[in-house]
Structures are given as C-alpha cells and as structure tokens.
Amino acid sequence: MNPINFNEVNVNYVADGCEDLPVFKGDNQIISCWELSAEEIQEIVKNKVIWLSIWGNAQPPVCLMAETPFIESQKESCSPCEECDSVNSPVCTKECQEACPECKNYRGDNNE
C-alpha cells in the first residue's frame, strides 16, 4: 500500500527513512488515503481480511473504510460559521451543525 494525495490534504508528515504521508488534519482526527497494488487487492479478495499494525504500547481509536469520509454536500449546503469557520472544513463538526441547523451531515457522538 502506498499513501496518496487527495484534495483535502492540509498537512504532509515527513520522517527520516519513511515515505511522506499526506493527510487531512482536523478536529481530533487525521485522515490518510492509501492505494493498493493489484497483488494486495487479490490478497484481500482471496482472504477477505485486512491487518492493522499500530506501533507503540497503546491502541488508539482507528477507523478503516473503503469510501471517502469527506462530505462534499456540506460545502454547498452551509455558509461558513463566523465563529469557527468549520463549514469550510471537509468534515462536518458539531460546531458546523450548531452554526448551521440546516446542515444534516454532522458525524459525531450524537449523530442519528
């Protein structure tokens, strides 16, 4: 798997001996996008599993997904909040929902 650029990238992590990691860094989350090789896709289809390895001694909350976590309709349905400007972020926040009641895209603890 190789990390790839995507439209919402706003930070690029760099470390000696590692490939650059383009990410979106937002409220309490960091999102990266990974491209699979043909061989990796065949392995996933064959075994129907993906392994996740975390370096360190603690297990942070993680989320693996196949579809984009970014909500495109948010930018069209909401005006920027004058206080936090969170609507300009690609992922809706609680602040966005509070500032823009017609925005139904909020993803969070109280999401229905």
Image (cartoon, helix red, strand yellow):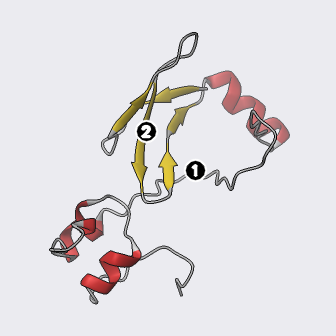
Looking at the figure, which quarter contains the N terminus? top right
* Residue 97 locus on image (x, y percent): 34, 82
- Amino acid on which the number 2 mark rests in the picture: Val
Give the residue at the far right of this rendering: 47
Q: Earlier in the sequence, mark 1 or mark 2?
A: 2
Q: Secondary structure at mark 1?
A: loop
- Say which of 95 and 40 sits in front: 95
Rendering quarter of residue 81: bottom left
* Residue 53 locus on image (x, y percent): 77, 36
Judged left or right of residue 34, residue 42 is: right
Give how far apart the Cα atoms at labels 1 and 2 are.
Answer: 16 Å
Residue that badge 2 annotates: 23
Q: Nearer the viewer, mark 1 or mark 2?
A: 2
* Residue 101 locus on image (x, y percent): 28, 89
Residue that badge 1 annotates: 66
**6 to 110, vertically: above or below:** above
Looking at the figure, which quarter contains the C terminus? bottom right
Q: Secondary structure at mark 2?
A: strand
- Amino acid on which the number 1 mark rests in the picture: Ala
